[in-house]
Image: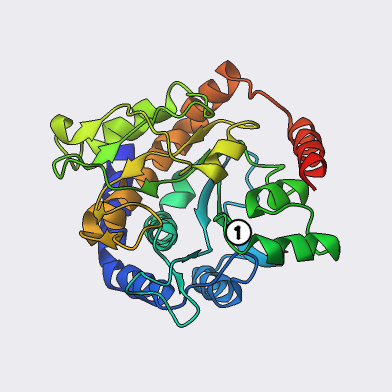
Amino acid sequence: MSKKILKELVCNSIDDHRKEILRIAREIQSHPELGFKEEYLSKKIAKVFEKMDLDVEDHLALTGCKATINEDLRGPNLAVIAALDAGLNPSQPDANEEGIVHNGGNNHQIAMMIGIAFGLIKSHAVQNLDGKVTFVAVPAQESVDLEYRDHLIENGKIHYRYGIQELLKRECFDEIDIALSIQNMDLGDIKTKLVISPNHPSIPVYDGLGVIFQENAKLFYGESQIKWSENIIRDEFFNIQELSKVMPTLQPLAGGVRGVRGGKDFELMDKDTAYIIPAKIMALTIVDLLYDNAKKTRKILKNHNPPKTIEEYLNENQNLQSCTE
């Protein structure tokens, strides 16, 4: 089947499941949970993947889960990651009685991940791809409730405060070649819908990934609506920042929200801009990366060596953590 037809089928599949994606997004918003406590959400995501006939591995790090498409293929393995946890801000209108609230876009990130899965699986596009896609729901990204996490460490339940580091420790990314994600942010100008390659000092740029994403973004937006690079000084990228030290990564920014991430004024403005269209763009990017013997992915992997091995990364961070205790 031609790649053009595959992409049409993927987009149609996401449109066909739009109501379900929006319903799941609302349910996530109404059940915020703090890091390493995301029991409800982990079970919810696991059930969604199980209904797609995927084998789910749960309780990755107390919470969190993952599921892989084309599990038996030998090709490259692309991870689509989304953070599970909410933040703390009692002044946010949507906060629950404990002040817990999804006011950072992680709930949108989960909706995007599920949308990508619907697009690739329900369209049967995966049968024409030469590689794997692993969906990873990552616990504990936000820097809140840290005393509880320290208590877990003291009692030998976890090794690190943050879920992405814990998953690396537990070998959940050992077979992953490239990590993909999308983060929501107020992009300032309402005309700007995407920033492809945020200029963050801690994240190396992997040539090819952003270009492929940009070409697919042009199917939905005009060139003036897409920015290539923007300086980001806030710590919005912890999960992808850490993964970029051990593998190629891509995490564009999507608009559709207003206000400061984590603040009381952070709110969703446009569901399509925030997660429906980004899910389509990332799904089409995955088609490009894994089509025709995954040639584009193999070229990226051949040309780029991550700064560290996972073992080196873990040793370094264990030493840093010991120094702060």
Looking at the rendered structure, the kind of residue marked 1 is Ala
Place of residue 241 in the rendered image (x, y in percent of width and height, measured from the top left): 55, 37
The quadrant holding residue 274 is bottom left
Question: Residue at horizontal 31%, vertical 49%?
Answer: 278
| 109 relative position to 239: left or right | left
Q: Is mark 1 on a helix, strand or loop?
A: loop
Location of residue 43 with respect to 54 vertically, above or below = below
Camera-nearest residue between 192 and 171: 192
Outermost residue on the top side: it is: 303
Q: Residue at x 58, y 24 (%)?
A: 301
Q: Residue 251: percent from the left, percent from the top?
A: 43, 39
Percent position (x, y) of residue 104? 41, 57
Q: In the rendered image of this protein, does residue 179 appear above or below residue 144?
A: above
Give the labeled residue for mark 1: 140
Could you classify mark 1 by the number of other residues whose Cα lies within 10 Å: few (under 14), some (14-19), or many (20 or more)? many
Location of residue 304 in the rendering, given as x and y in whole percent from the top left corner: 58, 19
What is the residue that sits farthest to the bottom in this orientation? 97
Instruction: Give the vertical position of 235 relative to 202 (above or below).
Output: below
Quarter of the image for residue 321 reads top right
Q: How many marks?
A: 1
164 to the left or right of 277: right
Nearer the observer, 138 or 134: 138
The image quadrant that residue 101 belongs to is bottom left
